[in-house]
Amino acid sequence: MGAVESVSVTSLISQEDLDDVRESVAALSASVASAAAMLRMKDAFEPFSGVLLSLQRDPMPALVGMPAWLSSSSGSPVSSRSVVADSIARIEVAGELSCAWLSLDKGESVQRAKALDEEQARGCRAGLLQGVPIGIKDMFDRRGRVARWGSAVRDHVAPANRDATIVTRLEGEGGVLIGALHMAEFAMSPTGLNDHLGHGRNPHQPDHVSGGSSSGAGMAVGAGHVPLAIGSDTGGSVRLPAALCGVTGLKPTQFRVSVFGAMPLSPSLDCIGPLAVSADLCGAALAAMAGPDPLDLSCVDLPFRDGSWRGRAPADFTVALPRLEVGDHLSAEMLAVVSRVRGVLSEAGVRFVEVPLPDLALYGQLGSVLLAAESTALHRDAIHGTPQIFGRQVRRRLSRGLLMSGMDYFDAQRLRAPLLRVFMRDILGGADALMLPTTPAGAPRIQDTIGNDHARLEREFAKLSYWTRGINYLGLPALSLPAGTDQAGLPLGVQFVGAPFDEERILALGHIAQSLPDWQKV
């Protein structure tokens, strides 16, 4: 550690925290060194988007269909204006769950919905998200507004002069963005913790966490404020709040959705994804957002076909499932939910095959190396100039990047391609998806996720994201579905992990599951 770095670290965190962070970084470095033994000097870093593209499977036959949730019993379209007004009315009486919303654009959204109704009356094409009220995590640029990224650091930033690409595309398909949503500070908490904005609260029991970092998205959909919200997922930040708040969440394949105009956290891992009332609505949102973007050269040229996942028979699918055991990362109630889901889907005709448990701990540690180095580099100016703007948990996480070895970062990047190929061969194999828990258990109490023992808290946070972090490192798509509750009535979720760019198959499994009459009983 050089002199300049030493000054930076000690100005960022206390000596007590520094000792613990050094230990954490040493553990990450040891994991990299162990895994890197499989590498040879000539094994260079492979551009990961190309690796993902090389492993994609043939798509399923397209089946055209429109989202069915936004239609009346008579089959005539529901007024966009009435749907948007209903969402706003729900938010205005939300009580303590109103903290999900940082801003609400009532006048603008009602006027936009009115214009959509008028266009439809003139016979204009209805978009994939026609009249759907949408909440958006406060990390996406919107013209004339400031996205604050869950921090006070951007209070004096000039408003954006153009929309993020996903904002343009959602609105282009008839979506109505009604406001900005709560998020963890700089998207750096799996619980929804935010020292500046207060904690995200679970819509089922507000003294429990919402999950994060897309905390407001989980809250808003889980509380019934909106049917669709947009978040981001760097280590589980769509799937964790989806599972804990009892909604559906989709993490797309890395590089499938443009990140232009979005807050960066770790560009090697960042994904933008929807949280919604159903897998079908998640699929429609992905169809609206996906596709090449000249403003984001990392975004691949793979548009997504709306409705292509519907109409498949359960017997068409094979799901891989590892042998799971109760332990630190899996409660007895969560294991029971996984078993019940397997039973319900098997009875419907889905085939299950047993596979080895993937090394999620290793994948998660390697992903943490990428996250530490990249997030710290992105916040370099603030770390050197105004470190006091960060909450303690965020300061601890950023300090890891100041201590991380460049060799460890490079090897963590080099390991992605070979480890993904091994995963595809030995774990996913010929199955359509891998089924895993989304979280170890239901949402913890807020009071159990705060305090001065940050070393203990970080260990607990790592457990919470155990089942999700490694999937980001592999770059794969994953769909989290609500699949039951624990004894306290808190939601539990399972996730289907697919092959690269194979959102169709995991959405098909989600559609099948949510169409089964027994699904709500699992």
Image (spheres, rainbow, N blue to C red):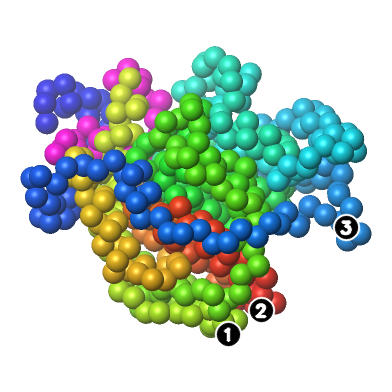
Q: Residue at x 42, y 46 (%)?
A: 254
| Label 1 Cα crowd, 10 Å radius (few <14 / some 14-19 / many 20+) | few
Determine the secondary structure under disc 2. Answer: loop
Q: Nearer the viewer, mark 2 or mark 1?
A: 1
Residue labelled with disc 1: 347
- Asked where in the image residue 356 lies, by quadrant, the reply is bottom left
Q: Earlier in the sequence, mark 3 or mark 1?
A: 3
Label 3 close to label 1 by CB (< 8 Å): no
Q: Earlier in the sequence, mark 2 or mark 1?
A: 1
Indicate the amino acid at tag 1.
Glu
Report, in whole angstroms, how far the alpha carbon at label 3 lies from the one at label 1: 32 Å
Q: Earlier in the sequence, mark 2 or mark 3?
A: 3
Nearest to the observer: residue 343 or residue 85:
343
Determine the secondary structure under disc 3. Answer: loop
Image quadrant in which the C terminus is located = bottom right
* Mark carried by residue 75: 3
Q: Residue at x 34, y 27 (%)?
A: 378
Q: Residue furthest bottom?
A: 347
Nearest to the observer: residue 11 or residue 54:
54
Q: Residue 338, relative to residue 255: is it above or below?
A: below
Residue labelled with disc 2: 518
Residue interval drawn in magenta: 382-407
Q: Residue at x 87, y 38 (%)?
A: 123
Q: Nearer the viewer, mark 3 or mark 1?
A: 3
Image quadrant in which the N terminus is located = top left
Q: Nearer the viewer, mark 2 or mark 3?
A: 3
The answer, for residue 106, to whether it is visible in the render is no
Determine the secondary structure under disc 1. Answer: helix
Q: Residue 477, relative to residue 423: is it above or below?
A: above
Q: Residue at x 61, y 38 (%)?
A: 136
Q: What x and y, as percent, mark residue 39?
A: 12, 52
